[in-house]
Amino acid sequence: MGVDIACVGFGPAMGGFLTTLSRQLTKEDGTPAFESVAAPGMPLQVICYERADDLGFGVSGVVTPGRSLRVSFPGLDPAQIPMAAPVKHETVAYLLDPVGASRRSFALRAADGLLRAFRWALPVRNHAFELPWIPSFLAKHEGLVLSMGQFMQWVGGQVLGSGAVQVWPSTPAAMALIEDNKVAGVRLLDQGVDKQGNAADGFTPGMDIRAALTVVGDGPVGAIGQQLDDHFGLPDGHHQHDWAVGMKFVVDLPAHAILEPGTVIHTLGYPEPEIFGFLYVHPGRIASLGIFVPSWFDSPVRTAYRYLQHWMLHPYLWRHLDGGTLRSWGAKSLLESGRRGEPHLVGDGYARIGEGSGSTNVLTGSGVDEAWATGVQLAEGVLELLRAGRPFTRENLEQAYVARRRASWVERESRVAERARDGFQRGVVTGLIGMGLTGLTGGRLNLPGKSMPPHRRIPTVEDYCRGRIPPEEVARIRAECKAKDLPLHDALMDRAGWPAIAFDGKLLVSQQDALLTGGKVQAPAGYADHVVFLHPEVCQRCGAQVCIDACSGQAIMPGPCGVPIFDREKCIHCGACLWNCSQPRPDDPERANVAFRAGTGGLHSAEN
Ligand SMILES: Cc1cc2nc3c(=O)[nH]c(=O)nc-3n(C[C@H](O)[C@H](O)[C@H](O)COP(=O)(O)OP(=O)(O)OC[C@H]3O[C@@H](n4cnc5c(N)ncnc54)[C@H](O)[C@@H]3O)c2cc1C
Ligand code: SF4
Ligand code: SF4
């Protein structure tokens, strides 16, 4: 099939692109502004393919300064958008360790001791120290608390209502059609195949969608973005080493909760010092809350789900949550390399927008505003080229899109942020000092730190536990877990002193219950597995098997002969396995031994 513009992924970046483009595709008299080249006599054919089963199922992100959104929607009234509220109160809190199980360095223990000793003079309540002042680079005054799922459905309604573009959910793009270094469109996913992708009953090969321009906005772990990076490489000096998984709950707050809509709470320090938390309050006594587990948290058992529960149970947060009910949950990777993870933004026949194009600001922790802005910038450039009748070559896209992006606040602020997180490579305290320095000096001062691919950072379980659990005990726990086919992290956390979670069946539920009820995970039959262990012999030699412990959906489990088993039914498409593997690929040491490909299914919730 031929179209003029094929788009991949319907996240905020594509929201910005299609909102801006669709408004200019019809003249005031209702006639098309541009004629299609792919289908002469027809209006310009623009189609967007979204992997998830409905609009807004594949996105996240909830507090945003909303600068670019307000430019696209002047006079934006949050009351028009479900679950939206203007930001009202912002707090940053350092959480002390109330259970004594957190792995705290000597420096942090000393700081905790001082805070506890001077709590009569300092704002230390409920085992937390509220920062008296929020640095301007972190503040989101005049911003918006949003459910991105709900926001994207609202945007989708307007874009589709224009009648000028189409958005097809439940349609993953499997690969880009690359011909002589030019992107000529995309191929959709094969249907009617077995788990390995071999033709089976009802085989339907993925359709080729040929397009003059392919817009790639498939987020941080998208298959098309990964393929383009493999094919074209990254610009010199760029890397995509830094990642995080964000896991969140959407919760009905209990009747006694006093948090107002628009409340924004950010936390640091607990359950492990490397883990950051957030709680944002929507109208209707609903909150989005969760944690970020970064790739520089050097743990081979960095499971997010149990840590999220310990975080909720911290007295500073639990006083607001006790009695609440889980509505839905989800997880998603964030590419935290920022500007240094930027790929080639354009080439003949294609352009990259959003987080996969390195737009996320790693100093301010803002991704939505930037992603949206890059989509708007591309749309303005595309309209300029369409009006001038110029083709979508690398050179023309450089002039029309990349130049706009370079001249914008997105580029200016991403340059400031570029080295903000380097210090975290050397530990959390260095990292926080480094971020503060970068933020307060506008990027002029930074603390250095050498970044490396996540798989090179991951220590063995024995090294990780050294000084707290003797190696012979680790060996015993490992053998017991192996005999029962259980992941290691729960047993190690129990041994490290983390109390068992007292499930209440409402908010504190097992991961399996969250998968089955709150998350509504589904995987249609007839598609290949999208998570693939590339070299099984490497898995057999792998000691840590981080992919199992770090899987957000318990979709990767211990398997026979040492090769893990992937269960598509439980996969929530967070992409964390892509960077939570401790072994390099034999043929590409920069990358780990897992492939995360285009796939169907995942979570059915438009609230995440
Ligand atoms: C838990 C969490 C909390 C966050 N909180 C904030 C916040 O408070 N503020 C903020 O500014 N940012 C936040 N972020 C970051 C923010 O979500 C991202 O920066 C932003 O969503 C990036 O937008 P995007 O359009 O580039 O990509 P995405 O939002 O990732 O959208 C990409 C889309 O492409 C689709 N897709 C992927 N592969 C394919 C394929 N092969 N074919 C078709 N479609 C495909 C995906 O399903 C998805 O819908 C948060 C992220 C997480 C995970
Ligand atoms: S995928 Fe990576 S972490 Fe998992 S078993 Fe294989 S080599 Fe080890
Ligand atoms: S298998 Fe699925 S749920 Fe597990 S880490 Fe990978 S993408 Fe996430």
Image: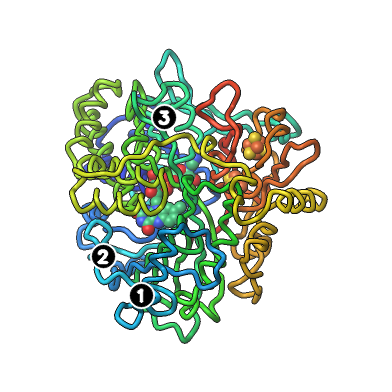
Q: CA distance from mark 1 to mark 2?
A: 19 Å
Q: Is residue 543 visible?
A: yes
Disc 3/disc 1 C-alpha distance (Å): 43 Å
Residue 299 picture location, percent across and down: 56, 48
- Residue 217 image point, x, y percent: 40, 39
Question: Of the residues shown, which amino acid type is indicated by label 1?
Answer: Pro
Neighbourhood count class around disc 1 (C-alpha, 10 Å): few under 14, some 14–19, many 20 upward: many
Q: Nearer the viewer, residue 129 or 307?
A: 129
> Would residue 359 be found to the left or right of residue 533 on screen?
left
Q: Along the polypeptide, which appears first: circle 3 or circle 1?
A: 3
Amino acid type at circle 2 is: Ile
**Residue drawn at x 20%, y 30% as measured from the top left:** 387
Name the residue beneath numbered marker 2. Answer: 134
Q: Could you tell me which residue is drawn at 30 percent across and 64 percent down?
A: 144
- Kindly identify the amino acid type of the residue bearing the numbered disc 3: Val
Numbered disc 3: secondary structure: strand
Tell me which corner region of the image, top left, top right, bottom left or bottom right, holds residue 325. Answer: bottom right
